[in-house]
């Protein structure tokens, strides 16, 4: 990756003039990240978020809110919103997913820490002005499946009315419970966005799209990970840990909501990964589609998803599910 042309002047204004700029990462958005190394200041992370595509203000607002609650988001060292550049605290290289992939971390202990961090997050007050993760947003997201997934596999006659009706029948209770007790939902809380910090604890990344939503959403994002397999026994243990530590009394209702949130998120991701391929030329995400189907089918097995499961049974036969992506995945 080539650093943005304004990066040297930006770093000079931040007191980091002459720092070495090294490629670090990109993600599924237009954001790019670079590590900057300065002989006196040390290391930082340069976030390049082109303002014509990305608004960095939500990232800043949520980062500052998390920091105020004693949670570890990268501290913002310098900013230039017109240029779309932020200089951030560097959390290092110990991202949870690669650490676990190399068998260098205690998976159970790390996931327990991640669950406890969520409990702490949910105990904190909501940031001022946070938008709700309501039916309009949930519906817009789940529509990505019928907008991108099915057309990519050649399905033209899509029962959209039935799709809408199935979801509308499934989530009234969940929506009411969300409105009664909303929490901050980071929306991409999983092993690739968690950092093991030298000081101990977890650093949080990729939270700029946070909304006020249901407590199960980030939990299912963590435990039904699109990019890595989480053993069902560990998922069950961590889910129970969350329920106990959050003081949730109606376990059955929470588990139903957990599967509803899982279905919504996982069906949405099937659409997002397809869109990344068809619109943005990022076919590498297609290798995750079989895992996503395994998760979706587990979600749909819960009685709370009966209307949605029925729609999928009638409209998405096995030939359009996991096996359909083998020839496209890299």
Image (cartoon, rainbow, N blue to C red):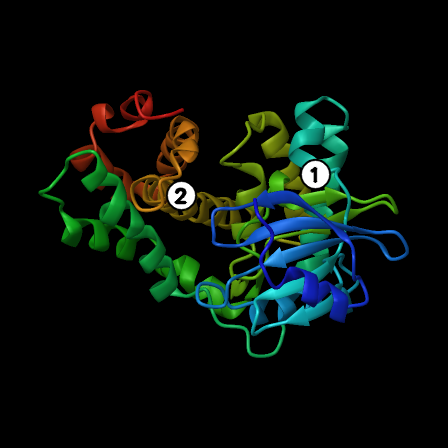
Q: Relative to residue 161, is residue 304 depicted above or below?
A: above
Q: Residue at x 90, y 56 (%)?
A: 40
Say which element carries label 2.
helix
Q: Relative to residue 251, is residue 133 depicted above or below?
A: below
Q: Relative to residue 326, is residue 206 depicted above or below?
A: below
Q: Quadrant of the C terminus?
A: top left
Task: Give the residue furthest to the right.
Answer: 40
Question: Is there a contact, CB below 8 Å, between mark 2 and mark 1?
Answer: no
Q: Position of residue 160 (x, y in %)?
A: 16, 51
Please name the residue that numbered disc 2 is placed on: 269
Q: Residue at x 52, y 51 (%)?
A: 217
Please name the residue that numbered disc 1 is placed on: 95
Q: Relative to residue 60, is residue 238 depicted above or below?
A: above
Q: Residue at x 43, y 28 (%)?
A: 291
- Give the alpha-carbon distance from disc 2 to disc 1, as whole Å: 22 Å
In the depicted view, which residue is nearer to us: 214 or 158?
158
Crowd band around label 1 with a 10 angstrom C-alpha radius: few (<14), some (14–19), many (20+): some
Residue 250 shows up from this direction: no
The earlier-in-sequence mark between 2 and 1 is: 1
């Amino acid at each position: 990756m080539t650093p943005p042309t304004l990066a040297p002047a930006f770093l000079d204004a931040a007191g980091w003039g002459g720092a070495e700029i090294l490629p670090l990462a990109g993600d599924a958005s237009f954001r790019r990240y670079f590590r900057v190394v300065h002989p006196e200041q040390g290391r930082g992370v340069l976030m390049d978020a082109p303002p014509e595509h990305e608004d960095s203000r939500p990232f800043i607002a949520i980062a500052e809110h998390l920091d105020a609650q004693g949670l570890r988001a990268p501290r913002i060292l310098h900013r230039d919103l017109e240029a779309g550049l932020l200089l951030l605290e560097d959390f290092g290289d110990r991202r949870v997913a690669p650490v676990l992939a190399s068998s260098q971390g205690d998976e159970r202990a790390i996931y327990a820490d991640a669950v406890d961090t969520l409990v702490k997050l949910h105990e904190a007050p909501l940031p001022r002005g946070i938008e709700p993760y309501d039916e309009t947003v949930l519906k817009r997201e789940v529509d990505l499946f019928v907008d991108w997934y099915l057309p990519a596999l050649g399905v033209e006659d899509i029962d959209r009315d039935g799709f809408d009706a199935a979801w509308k029948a499934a989530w009234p209770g969940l929506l009411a419970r969300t409105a009664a007790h909303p929490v901050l939902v980071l929306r991409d809380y999983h092993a690739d966005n968690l950092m093991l910090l030298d000081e101990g604890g977890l650093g949080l990344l990729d939270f700029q799209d946070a909304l006020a939503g249901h407590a199960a959403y980030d939990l299912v994002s963590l435990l039904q990970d699109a990019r890595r397999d989480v053993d069902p026994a560990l998922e069950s243990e961590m889910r129970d840990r969350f329920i106990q530590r959050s003081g949730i009394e109606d376990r059955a209702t929470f588990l139903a909501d957990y599967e509803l949130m899982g279905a919504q998120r996982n069906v949405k991701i099937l659409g997002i990964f397809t869109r990344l391929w068809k619109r943005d030329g990022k076919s590498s995400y297609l290798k995750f589609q079989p895992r996503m189907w395994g998760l979706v089918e587990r979600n749909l097995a819960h009685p709370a998803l009966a209307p949605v499961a029925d729609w999928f049974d009638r409209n998405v036969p096995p030939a359009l599910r996991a096996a359909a992506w083998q020839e496209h995945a890299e």
